[in-house]
């Protein structure tokens, strides 16, 4: 009974503490509190908008709309209220600026290292801890400079057959003879299998299945509040990250042995490429660095490709006229390819006869 009587006082105390913290952060941290203008000439003007509650920001509204599949409303409402070019907000504990429309995309993707630089959230840094003395941003730059030598057209052409085989196996196992297919989770099986095959040469479906849950936990943790307590999404993601890095580390150590024994190819996958390639300073990547970056590539490849394929299938299903045009174009391209192959065969046979 005494507790019930004191409950209103306790709630008032919590509310006053919360409001005091909000006022304090607003004065000390204009970026977090949403101050658009400043009398200090050294402080740059911020885009219009609001950053919501301390720490939480506008995350609740964002994830609510995301769960209800109306995430476009989150952007549209703020574009109409603040600016159709750029507005500020705060998500998962981080102040952010949302750039809208073609102009925003062009500015973002054409000004890296000029006005825009790669930045990782605190949740990301906890899930993907830095290796040695390098930050995640530095690791990202090193890997990005290394990858083009592997992603050349002649190199990628060697993997077309493998990708086609993985796709056919996936369609046969998960799509054929089914009345209904839930696209997003089904496609995630394909993208993860492809990523494991392309990056680490993992072919065993059971092994890929074992990695599915940790990858999903990491993905959920990347879009969660930066609160590392037992039971939170971030805490599960950190544990899953440790498990994944241990699994990848075992594969890396075995690949070193296979390369020394000549039982593995130097162009077998990205893992072999990273073990045998030096960075711009002529240094080889350390094992810890390779493990961390390979795990990041698998997670990034899994998430982005899965999302893109899911949206493509969603819009093809919702827009039949677009589907018909895509199908017509693919059939025309296939017919042209077959005709070119027939003509090439005739020319080869003609040369043989001569």
Image: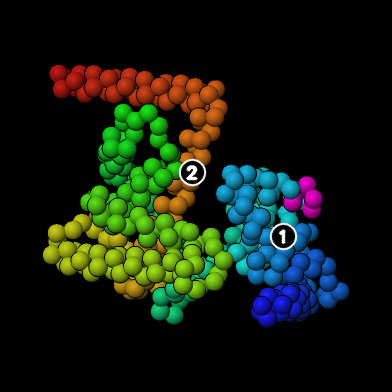
Q: In the shown orientation, is residue 333 left or right of residue 155? A: right
Image coordinates of residue 229 in percent, x first then y, are 50, 73
Dominant secondary structure of the residues highlighted in magenta in the image: helix
Looking at the image, residue 207 sits to the left or right of residue 331; the answer is: left
- Give me the residue at 45% from left, 24% from top: 327
Please tell me how crowded label 1 is: few (under 14), some (14-19), or many (20+) other residues with Cα within 10 Å. Answer: many
Query: Which residue corresponds to the image point at 41% horizontal and 45% vertical from the top-left?
Result: 185
Which residues lie in the magenta part? Answer: 78-82
* Mark 1 or mark 2: whose residue is earlier in sequence: 1
Determine which quarter of the picture holds residue 157. top left
Q: Where residue 241 appears, x then y in whole percent? A: 39, 67
Asked if residue 296 is positioned above or below residue 242 in the image, the reply reads above
Q: In this view of the protein, can residue 278 be seen by the observer?
A: no
Q: Which residue is mark 1?
A: 88
Q: CA distance from mark 1 to mark 2?
A: 26 Å
Horizontally, residue 82 falls left or right of residue 122, namely right
Q: Which residue is mark 2?
A: 308
Q: Residue furthest front?
A: 1
Q: 135 or 188: which is nearer to us?
A: 188
> Which residue: 54% across, 71% down?
227
Residue 32 at x, y = what percent?
71, 70
Q: Is residue 2 magenta?
A: no
Percent coordinates x, y for residue 291 in the rendering: 34, 68
Label 2 neighbour load within 10 Å: few <14, some 14-19, many 20+: few
């Amino acid at each position: 009974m005494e507790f019930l009587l004191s409950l209103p006082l306790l709630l008032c105390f919590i509310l006053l503490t919360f409001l005091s913290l909000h006022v304090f952060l607003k004065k000390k941290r204009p970026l977090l509190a949403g101050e658009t203008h400043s009398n200090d000439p050294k402080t740059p003007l911020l885009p219009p908008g609001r950053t919501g509650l301390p720490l939480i920001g506008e995350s609740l509204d964002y994830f609510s709309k995301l769960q209800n599949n109306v995430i476009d409303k989150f952007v549209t409402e703020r574009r109409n209220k603040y600016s159709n070019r750029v507005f500020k907000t705060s998500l998962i504990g981080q102040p952010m600026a949302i750039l809208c429309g073609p102009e925003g995309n062009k500015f973002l993707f054409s000004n890296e290292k000029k006005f825009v630089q790669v930045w990782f959230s605190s949740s990301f840094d906890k899930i993907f801890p830095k290796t040695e003395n390098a930050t995640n941003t530095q690791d990202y730059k090193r890997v990005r400079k290394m990858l083009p030598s592997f992603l050349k057209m002649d190199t990628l052409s060697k993997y077309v057959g493998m990708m086609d085989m993985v796709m056919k196996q996936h369609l046969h196992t998960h799509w054929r003879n089914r009345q209904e297919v839930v696209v997003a989770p089904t496609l995630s099986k394909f993208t993860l299998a492809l990523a494991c095959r392309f990056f680490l040469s993992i072919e065993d479906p059971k092994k890929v299945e074992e990695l599915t849950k940790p990858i999903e936990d990491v993905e959920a943790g990347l879009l969660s509040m930066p609160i590392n307590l037992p039971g939170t999404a971030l805490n599960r993601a950190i544990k899953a990250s440790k498990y994944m890095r241990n699994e990848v580390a075992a594969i890396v150590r075995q690949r070193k042995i296979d390369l020394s024994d000549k039982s593995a190819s130097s162009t077998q996958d990205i893992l072999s490429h990273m073990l045998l390639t030096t960075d711009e300073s002529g240094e080889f990547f350390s094992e810890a660095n390779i493990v961390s970056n390979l795990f990041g590539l698998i997670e990034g490849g899994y998430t982005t490709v899965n999302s893109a394929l899911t949206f493509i299938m969603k819009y093809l299903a919702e827009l039949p006229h677009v589907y018909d045009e895509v199908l017509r174009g693919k059939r025309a391209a296939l017919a042209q390819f077959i005709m070119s192959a027939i003509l090439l065969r005739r020319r080869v046979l003609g040369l043989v006869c001569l």
